[in-house]
Image (tube, grey):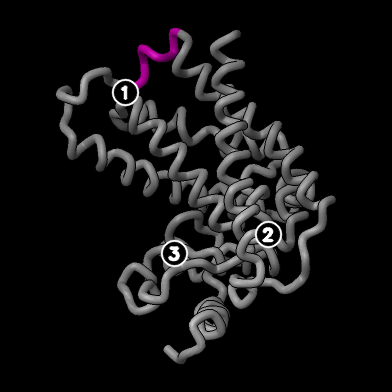
Amino acid sequence: MKDLFDLSSMSFVQYLFFAGLYYWICYFLLKKTLSNAKIQQKEITETDVRREVFHSTISSFIMTFMIYVVVHTPLRQYTNIYKNISDYSLYWLIGSILIGLFIHDTYFYWMHRLLHHKKIFRLIHLVHHKSTNPSPFAAYSFHVLEAFAEGLIVPLLLFVIPLYPISIYAFVLSSLVINIYGHLGYEIAPQWLRKSFLFKILNTSVYHNLHHKQFKGNYGLYFRFWDRIMKTENPDYEKVYDKIQQKRFEEKF
C-alpha cells in the first residue's frame, strides 16, 4: 500500500505543479501581457478552481490506482512492459509514445462521444462540463466513473503495445501537459502554427475551449482528424482561433 500511496502522491503533486504553474503564469504573472490571448473574457472564480481541484484530486488517485493494479500485481506478467531498451530500440522507445498518443486520441474521441449521450451526460460528464470557462485545474476534473474510463487508457496500452517504463511515464506526463493546455483558457500557440501543416492535425486551447463553451463538437483530445472525419468539428473553430491570434499578434493571417 505504501507504493500506491507514493504513486498517488506523486501523480497528484505532478498535476498540481503543472496546472498550478500554468495558472500562476497566465492568470497572475503575465495576466496583462496575455490579456489578448484570453479565449473567454469572463473571469474564473475561486469556487470554480476549488471544485476542479477537488474532483481532480479524486480522479488522480483513481487513475493512479488503475496503473498500480496492473503494474504491481500478478497482472503485470500479461502486459507488454519490457525492462531493457535493447529488447526493442531507442526508435521504438520514442515511437511508442507517439503511437500511444494516437491510440489514446482514438479511444478518447469515441469515449467522449459516448459521454455526451443525453442519458449519460447529466449523470457523469456534467461534472467536467461545469467548467464552461475552464482553468488549467479542470484537466482531471471528472466524475468518479469518468475518471475510471479516462484512466483505463494506460492499462489498455500496457496490454496492446510494448512499453518501456520511461515511455509509460513520458506518455502520462505529456498527456497531462497537453490536457492542461487544452483547458488553459488562453491561446498561447506560436504564430507560425497557423500556416504549418501541423495546424490541420493538432488541437489547440481554443479548440477544446469551444467544446466547453458550447457543449458539443471538437471531441478529440490531441488531434483534429476524428472530428474532421466524423464531421463533428466546430465550423467556427478556425474563425475564432484566427480572431484571437490576430488580436495577439495584431496582424492579419
Callout 1, which amino acid?
Asn
Tell me the residue that label 2 is attached to.
28
- Quarter of the image for the N terminus: give it: top right
Q: In the image, residue 225 lies at what x, y percent?
A: 40, 64
Question: Residue furthest toward the right?
Answer: 47
Q: Are marks 1 and 3 in contact (CB under 8 Å)?
A: no
User: Closer to the camera: disc 2 or disc 1?
Assistant: 2
The CA span between labels 1 and 3 is 29 Å
User: Closer to the camera: disc 2 or disc 3?
Assistant: 2
Tell me the residue that label 1 is attached to.
80
Q: Are marks 2 and 1 in contact (CB under 8 Å)?
A: no
Q: Mark 2 vs mark 3: which is more N-terminal? A: 2
Helix, strand or loop status at disc 3: loop
Helix, strand or loop status at disc 2: helix
Left or right: 113, with 47 as reference point: left
Q: Main secondary structure of the magenta part?
A: helix
Q: In the image, residue 198 lies at what x, y percent?
A: 34, 67
In depth, the one of 145 and 19 nearer the eye is 19
Which residue is painted at 61% across and 77% down in the image? Answer: 36
Q: Residues in magenta?
A: 74-81
In depth, the one of 69 and 196 nearer the eye is 196
In depth, the one of 34 and 241 nearer the eye is 34
Total labels drawn: 3
Left or right: 89, with 30 as reference point: left
Q: Please determine whether, in this image, residue 136 is positioned above or below residue 41.
A: above
Callout 3, which amino acid?
Arg
Q: In the image, residue 253 lies at what x, y percent?
A: 42, 88
